[in-house]
Image: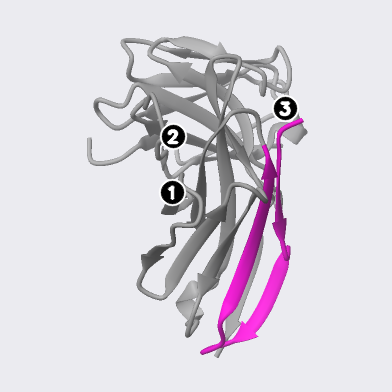
Amino acid sequence: EDKVVQSPLSLVVHEGDTVTLNCSYEVTNFRSLLWYKQEKKAPTFLFMLTSSGIEKKSGRLSSILDKKELFSILNITATQTGDSAVYLCAVQGLIQGAQKLVFGQGTRLTINP
Amino acid sequence: GAGVSQSPSNKVTEKGKDVELRCDPISGHTALYWYRQSLGQGLEFLIYFQGNSAPDKSGLPSDRFSAERTGGSVSTLTIQRTQQEDSAVYLCASSLEGTSGGYEQFFGPGTRLTVL
């Protein structure tokens, strides 16, 4: 069964701390892994990773994929209160000829001032 | 359009009534997805369209749920005889259909459905 598992489920830190969010997966015919940030309703896109070992970076956020060990991490340095959100990991696979996106349950990150 | 739009943004209905949710994808996006997010839960895949056809309907929770897409653009998700457990935020996403390396899905703002 295709699945995506994120850890931790919840994380509370102080402003300025660095956090690492984890995502492990099992999916048929892996295509890519995506990270989203969800603050209210719609998730907003952060990164898409397709190649192993290549870090994607955007400001204080970075992410890397390990296709051999089937996991990805999302790092946030110098956290700010505006980083508080649910971070979703999703993996795209090709199942019976159809593209499918499987989401993890999310990590709820709370940044305290 | 500039992004994925959904309507209505909020819908309150009585148990047993039918509801129709609408999604307008980004122009030119051939793939369209419906998801559901219940309170405190992760995103649950419902159905995927490639053009007007739905190669993957595996996520539809029951035969009360149906979806269609016309003209390779607008999609409607219909829930018949709504139940209280149908209460959730229904999210639509669209993407370009890539042939390799995956692709990015862009999400709409969602429709919050409340069944009383």
Residues at badges 1 and 3 in contact (C-beta under 8 Å)? no
Q: Which mark is residue B102?
A: 2
Could you tell me the amino acid type at mark 2?
A: Gly
Could you tell me the amino acid type at mark 1?
A: Met
Q: Secondary structure at mark 1?
A: strand
Q: Is residue B108 above or below residue B71?
A: below
- Quadrant of image for the N terminus of chain A: top right
Q: CA distance from mark 3 to mark 2?
A: 39 Å
Q: Which mark is residue A48?
A: 1
* Direction from residue A35 to residue B116 in the image, left or right: right
Instruction: Please report the bounds of the magenta region as a residue range.
Output: A1-26
Q: Which mark is residue B15?
A: 3
Query: Residue A95's x, y, as percent?
Result: 61, 21
Question: Which chain contains the residue that carries disc 3?
Answer: B
Res. B113 in view: no
Q: Mark 3 and mark 2, same subunit? A: yes
Q: Is residue A26 above or below residue B65?
A: below
Residues at badges 3 and 2 in contact (C-beta under 8 Å)? no
